[in-house]
Image (cartoon, rainbow, N blue to C red):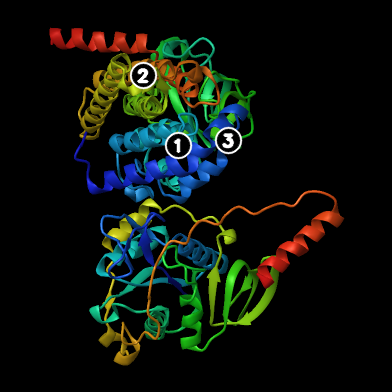
Amino acid sequence: MKIIVLIKQVPATTDVKIDPETNTLKREGVEAVINPFDMYAIEEALRIRERLGEGEIVALSMGPPQAEQALREAISMGCDRAVLLSDRKFAGSDTWATSYTLARAIRKIGDCRVILCGKQASDGDTAQVGPGVSTHLDIPQVTYVKKIEKIDAASATVERMTEEGYDIIETPVPVVLTVVKEINEPRLPSLKGKMRARKAGIPVWTAEDLGCDEGKIGLDGSPTRVVKVFTPPPREGGRVLEGEPEETSKELAGLIKDIIIG
Amino acid sequence: MDYLLTEEQQMIKDLCRQIAEEKIKPVAAEYDESGEFAWDIMKVFAESDICGIYIPEEYGGMGGGVLELAIATEELSWGCGGISLGFAATGLGTFPIILYGNEEQKAKYLPDIASGKKLAAFALTEAEAGSDAGGIKTTAKKEGDHYVLNGTKQWITNAGEAEIYTVVAMTDRARGARGASTFIVEKDTPGVSFGKKENKMGIRSSATREVIFDNCRIPKENILGREGLGFIVAMKTFDHSRPGVAAQAVGIAQRALDEAVKYSHERKQFGHSISSFQGVQFMLADMAMQVEASRALIYSAAKMIDSGAKNIAKVSAMCKTFASDTAMKVTTDAVQVFGGYGYMKEYPVEKLMRDAKITQIYEGTNQIQRGAIASSLIKESLA
């Protein structure tokens, strides 16, 4: 069974500066790592392969040439091989264009039963690429997966985390699963994995290799634009009303009235 | 200092530091307190492929040597000098097989050690024999196709946890040290049992027990080398393993230095960080010099041993003695830098001091080592 893990290289710190001119993240001089949520996806792929006793795991990333480093790290953890999508034409892609491009690559890799990725990236925080890929591929998706109960070449049963608990979902495969950190504890790389990673040839596919429709990639293929990026002000502490229920409920009603009526 | 390690050695160093930082450090205090053996960390060692770094490639290892073992042991010991012993003492138990095992013995035992499936232990010390190997009382009597072992080994690291034991026993007591032989004994052999786990000052999560042989019959094929070679096997084994003890010591010392430097920024007295006081600065500088000098000596000794050099007893003893004395001094100074806090178990440095002490004692006390260094010097001067 072939499993594809989608990974993104992100700045190691959450304290990233934003370029006020271009509204993009300043990545220079910041150490880059695999998006932490994608680490859980890699680990889960390895566990599926161990559970089934067979399978091939392909790590797939779209990004600048240096994203190759993240793919090598994925191989050092145990992924069988990796593919990088890198082309100047991909620059400026929003989540829609990115998921279109990734979907093209998944088709080109072919015969994949499960696509795993983190629930979101720690830099952009959109949580849209996983679902976007499933839409472009026209296959089911389950987001916020916290446990894979059963999986084979025909179907999967998974637990989707909700705010109150979890849903148990049965889905046919191929399927896109986005995972939360509750699903596992990612392993460290192994020495043999690190050596394999050092030597591994990682093919770089361009827009042409993927046969992309040029109107659907990069800035031109992106229906959304980032108008402004800013750090939201920290949430102010709430207020606790104390006293007898009768009084506090009256006080609360008064506060709500003030907000609604002003 | 940059030791110009190969890419592979650097990889070992980085990975072992990552294991120490992410997996060992967070649980070290807990294991120190409970004295439990850290099997979950042994599993991490196995999954990370580090168990075979000093084992030849044809037996599933990475084909490294004493230097690779030292690099790994140092980094793991930075995390915890007790937990790292599950790995390092397996090296001690495995060297007799690497150095003196025949093809069949190597093929049978090394792959499981290399994969991390099994741990090993070396059983030499007894109540009345350690450095004085001639005083060994455990006997191995040949009976047909078997040897029958009787006796009790003491303070055996990894005992009860390891599957494979290399055991020194007397095949001919009349010949003294020349009547000793070394055997491979599997844990589940009838007649093998273990004493209670010792309650130690330091390296508390490491398992230290008696290994008791009561009419334990092992196939005669399990002898390493031949009868009478036991003392030589033990000495050559220690020549190869002592840089590992030294590396354990330098790992502990480096951690003590790191903790002391960090704390000296944080701790404020008289309105200043104590790192701005010359009295503290000089201590830190001395600690750093001693740690670096120890490391340089270990790496040099290890390289010399790996090169196949013949007379390695002196350098092996030198690096063990120098690094373990350094560890004791540096960890004591780290406690001093921490002051009263350093004496408290909530802070990590008192454990380092307790863990450091054993490195001056085991695999031959530092007094025995100094004796060996001196006798080498005298021998060389007369040659």
Name the spot of residue B320 as percent of width and height, x first.
33, 21
| Residue identified by numbered label 3 | B187
Three-letter code, disc 2? Val
Residue A20 figure quarter:
bottom left
* Of marks 2 and 3, the one in the foreground: 2
- Count the numbered circles shown: 3
Mark 2: secondary structure: helix
The disc at residue B87 is 1
Mark 3: secondary structure: loop
Name the spot of residue A139 as percent of width and height, x first.
53, 86
Three-letter code, disc 3? Lys
* Of marks 1 and 2, the one in the foreground: 2
Q: Could you tell me which chain the residue with mark 3 belongs to?
A: B
In-image side of B75 versus A148 (left or right): left
- Which residue is most to the front? A262
Foreground residue among A19 and B349 = A19
Is residue B125 something that shows in the picture?
no
Q: State which quarter of the image contains the C terminus of chain A.
A: bottom right
Name the spot of residue B251 as percent of width and height, x first.
37, 30
- How many neighbours does mark 1 have within 10 angstroms: few (below 14), some (14-19), or many (20 or more)? many
Taking the spot 40% from the left edge, 13% from the top edge, the residue there is B365
- How many neighbours does mark 2 have within 10 angstroms: few (below 14), some (14-19), or many (20 or more)? many
Three-letter code, disc 1? Phe
The disc at residue B330 is 2
Mark 1: secondary structure: helix
Taking the spot 34% from the left edge, 55% from the top edge, the residue there is A194
Q: Could you tell me which chain the residue with mark 2 belongs to?
A: B
Is there CB contact under 8 Å for labels 2 and 3?
A: no
